[in-house]
Amino acid sequence: MNVAIQDSPVASQDDSVAQLDRLASLAEDVIRRCRAAGASEVEVGASIDSGLNVGVRLGEVETVEHSRDRGFGVTVYFGKRKGSASTADLAADSITKTIEQACAIAKYTEEDPCAGLADPTRLAKDFPDLDLWHPWRVDPHDAIRLGIEIEAAGRAYRGITNSEGASVQAGESLSVLATSAGFVGRERGTRHMLSCALIAGDEAGMQRDYWYESVRAEGDFGDPAAIGRKAAERALARLDARELTTREAPVLFAPEVARSLIGHLVSAVSGGALYRKSSFLLDHAGKSILPQFVDIVEKPRLPRGHASGNFDGEGVATGERPLVRAGVLERYVLGSYSARKLGLESTGNAGGIHNLVVKTGEDDFEAMLRKLGTGLLVTEVMGQGVSIVTGDYSRGASGFWVENGVIAYPVEGITIASNLSEMFRGIAAIGADVDPRSHVLTGSILVERMTIAGQ
């Protein structure tokens, strides 16, 4: 047990602004020093992350941890030669050594015609408040009581025999990105999480499951005890799981699993996979890849969004743009480097995708089960059997066998397999049961047919 209770390092509104100003001043000073050393272009990133993490198990405190991490990175270009170095120490000596290392690396690397900063005309110029900053001033003792309450609500269920514990997390992040093109972008955000994992048991064996909530603002949590109850209900529902014989059947991906399918799509249309020619969706821009009823829109400036931001990892301005419209792939997902490699322009996605909103139908979860009819409901996938190069998909899975729109019994020890191209074209419906805990906002996804490998 590791317990060290002290005052939480949550920053006030004024303090966070002052810290961002200090990081910005540091970044601008480093840029001047790099230019003086001969760098033609410079990019600097600096961050401070802090938080509180409390863990309880079986009604007792297991951990109380305060964290405060700093990060600093500099990338320099000497013409088309690039060098990068980073440190977790913001002391003057460490900064000096980091600058020297980056410059030394750049002088010995090969020239890359695609290297360099983002196009200055594409840099963000407006920075609206996206409502991402909501520090949670939770006292460690109160966090402990909250964790115990969450776990106790689940442990109260008959059939719950053990617990892996509950956790309460409050976190905040401050970061600055600055470049020699005159761009200085400041970001601050908070992220808080409550979770619980429980074990159910009977004469046939044991099953584990969990639940969690993740929010920007503590006030967006629902009833915390409901997290423990949900974890208990999910674990109990998995008892007496069966295996299936090998067959083909329709598969319904629950919302928390369905978002992984959208993640595979994003990986396949991202710049790195494309310019390396290692994507099954190479040269598919402007082509139909999903049914006509499917729209996917990127909304980087969604208030309180899990991946909201006014600029990407290079300072390029973000904006609402379709990724898929009426089933047609509208564009790729590119930063400046991959865009240059492909002869295209950045889409403002250096560092990754922002909030993706998948157009849903009108069916709730129960209606989606009825649409599934007889088939497999997948609530968990495991393993790494997905090839973005070929689109081949094969993953371990567990969930429930459904008959005539009603859950019949839990299943485990199976593998679901197909090809992502066929799975995407075979999407029959998308539910209105959106899981809000991710930057990929989608409901459950029904795929017409997959191979289920079992006994």
Image (cartoon, rainbow, N blue to C red):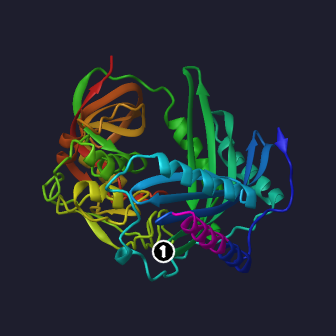
In this view, the residue in front, 185 or 68, is 185
Magenta stretch, overall SS: helix
Task: Name the foreground residue: 303 vs 189.
Answer: 189
Q: How many marks?
A: 1
Question: Percent position (x, y) of residue 372?
Answer: 26, 44
Describe the element under mark 1 as helix, strand or loop.
Answer: loop
Residue at screen point 72% across, 80% down = 14
Part of the protein shown in magenta: 23-38
| Residue 125 in sight from this viewpoint | yes
- Residue 418 or residue 147, whichever sits in front: 418
424 within the magenta span? no
Q: Which residue in the protein does label 1 denote?
A: 303
Q: In the image, what residue occupies the spot 50% across and 65% down?
A: 42
> Is 7 rendered above or below residue 157?
below
Residue 444 drawn at (x, y percent): 34, 51
User: Front-most of 69 and 134?
Assistant: 69
- The C terminus - image quarter: top left
Give the x, y percent position of residue 314: 44, 65
Q: Position of residue 245 (x, y in %)?
A: 29, 20
| Left or right placement of residue 320 versus residue 175 in this view | left
Sort mark 1 into few (<14), some (14-19) or many (20+) by Cα contacts within 10 Å: some
